[in-house]
Image (tube, rainbow, N blue to C red):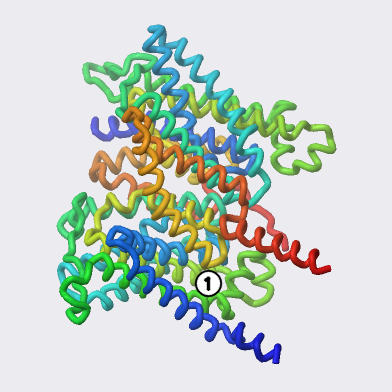
Amino acid sequence: MTRFIDLTLNGISTGAIYAVVALALVLIWRATRIVNFAQGAMLMITTFIASSVISSSGSYWLGFGVALACGLVLGAVVERVLMRRVEGGPPLNAVIVALGLLILLEAIAGMIWGNTPRSFPPAFSIQGYDIGGTRVLFSPNDTFTVLVVIGVALVLTAVFRGTAIGLKMRAAAFRPEVARMLGVRVGRMLTLGWALAALVGSLAGLLVAPEIFVGPNQFDPILVFGFTAAVLGGLDSFAGAAVGGILLGLALSYVSGYEGSSLVTLAALVILIVVLMIRPGGLFSSTQERRV
Amino acid sequence: MSALLGRLRAPRSSLERSLLIVLASGLLLFLASEALSEFNDLQLASGGYYFVALAGLTVLTGLSGQISLGHGALMAVGAYTVALLIGNEHWALVPALLAAVVVSAVVGVAVGAAASRLRGPYLAGATLAFAIGLPALADKYTNLFGGENGLVINPPTPPSFLGTNFPLERWEAWIACVAVLVVLFVLNNLLHSGIGRAFRAVRDDEIAASLCGLHVGRVQTLAFIVSAACAGLGGGLLAVVLQLAAPGAFELALSLSLFTAVVLGGLGSLVGAIWGAALLVLLPTWTNNLAHSFSLSTNVSANLPLAIYGCVLIVAMLLWPSGIQGGVRAIFARVRLLRASEEN
């Protein structure tokens, strides 16, 4: 029973990480209809920057803030310089450019910081809580992670649903021409969407880095599982991304705990296929009209 | 007379045209393999198996409009089939390759049926999960698939009438090239048949196609089966050429590089697959040589080839949105236009 509880808690904390990455992907998808495969490399760069700042200044929270700021800037620059040229074109071209950026950023990180992964400090203690004399697999740092995920999902939903800027971003994504006629600065909205998404992504990097270390290729699985979580939940829904991430984290934690870690990727495939066969647009999809 | 010449130059039926293309490229490949060094013959062989897999992918993505980030896993299916049949059951080469085609086509039925319900990023996500999920089986069934080390098979032996000194690499190149020609012939005919038209109709407008009486799901599944069979053959050839089927060769990177190569080469034409295969074989060699020709620190020289690869992907996509073949076609069109305006 304690094993089950431990696996559940572990699943929730890793699932929360997948959820943050999924939120970043959903944000870009909603803003520009592009799946950002470079997300993993972008958050890798900001986490490396955080690592350098922390080791030179000694302050965790300074590194944390710098990483978030760098994420914001990096996202805006990537959209303005690269993605602007492929937006609205064939969707596959955007995917290729994102993959190219992923490879380029990983190579640049390898050139600057080397290919050997290095450790990264957690925000809070990673010592599990002591409940009735037994140590559970859930630490203050995990609490922080889960709270961050819930907070980000709520804030994003509130911004997109309830604010003028959120409405403008949605309008720019769905009907750019009409939005432009109504006075929305479409280009600026797209840049903002990418910047916000990269900010959320860099948050995910900071949260997961203590567990998996920082290295050029270290975040690839996080991107793959984050994307799986986003697809699971439905790419158009922030709540879907959060729920998809937690569900995936739980399922993979049980599989690796009871059946062995070699089956984790296979389990992700099975879960995704089962869900998509029942709901081809993800768990939180709404029905779509189709036209000739 | 000119009409007769015109007919001579361009045969009417697509069967004749395919045969001509195959004969011409066969002759070209034969002469090339004779002239090349052993290392380059090996490159020709790997270009061959990449082309076979990419040709299948271009049928799927370029003609039927479905994305697949999981073709590396289908190549793994073919490779393991060949390795098991040749290594454990001592089958001959050709039946083993045919079996690889059949087995991966059967896998393609399952994947294709699932894929035909999915669109865009959802299909991308599902095939991505397929690419990372399937190789895990090799770890799970270590006894059968050899785990991380994979399965080793004996190299194919050149027939004795070619002489005792006939290089193995050239024989492997010949095997791969024969497969390339067969695939070229079959696919070229398929694309110019009713099935090819059905693929394009479904790609361009699903609802219009279904109003014309096409069963969209079935057409998409068929495209997936054709493409999976090609990937399986490509994987089988890879196992023969490398004499190894191991999970390390079929990681996500392979699936992604197949996908990027087919888009970069130019979707929807078999020539695009040739560009893609050339890119996959030559680019790593060139960038490695380039990186080691300067005296750079290890960190930089180890990562320079990757950086160049990333830049090539980005720049090529921005310069030629419809791939290398699209760029070449645009240049030809401009030349023709210039010539026409000079004549006027």
The N terminus of chain B, quarter of image: bottom right
The C terminus of chain B, quarter of image: bottom right
Residue A267 x, y percent position in the rendering = 34, 48
Q: Identify the residue at image location x=60%, y=50%.
A: A91
Q: Identify the residue at image location x=43%, y=18%.
A: A50
Q: Which residue is label 1 attached to? A: B218
Up the image or down, A198 lies above or below B69; here it is above
Q: Which quadrant of the figure has residue A155?
A: top right
Q: Nearer the viewer, residue B122 or B177?
A: B177
Structural crowding at the residue carrying mark 1, measured as other residues with C-alpha within 10 Å and reported as few (<14), some (14–19) or many (≥20): few
Q: Is residue B116 visible?
A: no
Q: Nearer the viewer, residue B47 or B92?
A: B47
Residue type marked 1 = Arg
Residue A73 x, y percent position in the rendering = 58, 23
Up the image or down, B296 lies above or below A223; here it is above
Q: Which quadrant of the figure has residue A228?
A: top left
Q: Identify the residue at image location x=45%, y=67%.
A: B227
Up the image or down, B126 lies above or below B212; here it is above
Which chain is mark 1 on? B
Horizontal relation, residue B48 to residue A65: left or right:
left
Q: Identify the residue at image location x=52%, y=76%.
A: B188
Horizontal relation, residue B26 to residue A188: left or right:
left
Q: Which quadrant of the figure has residue A176?
A: top right
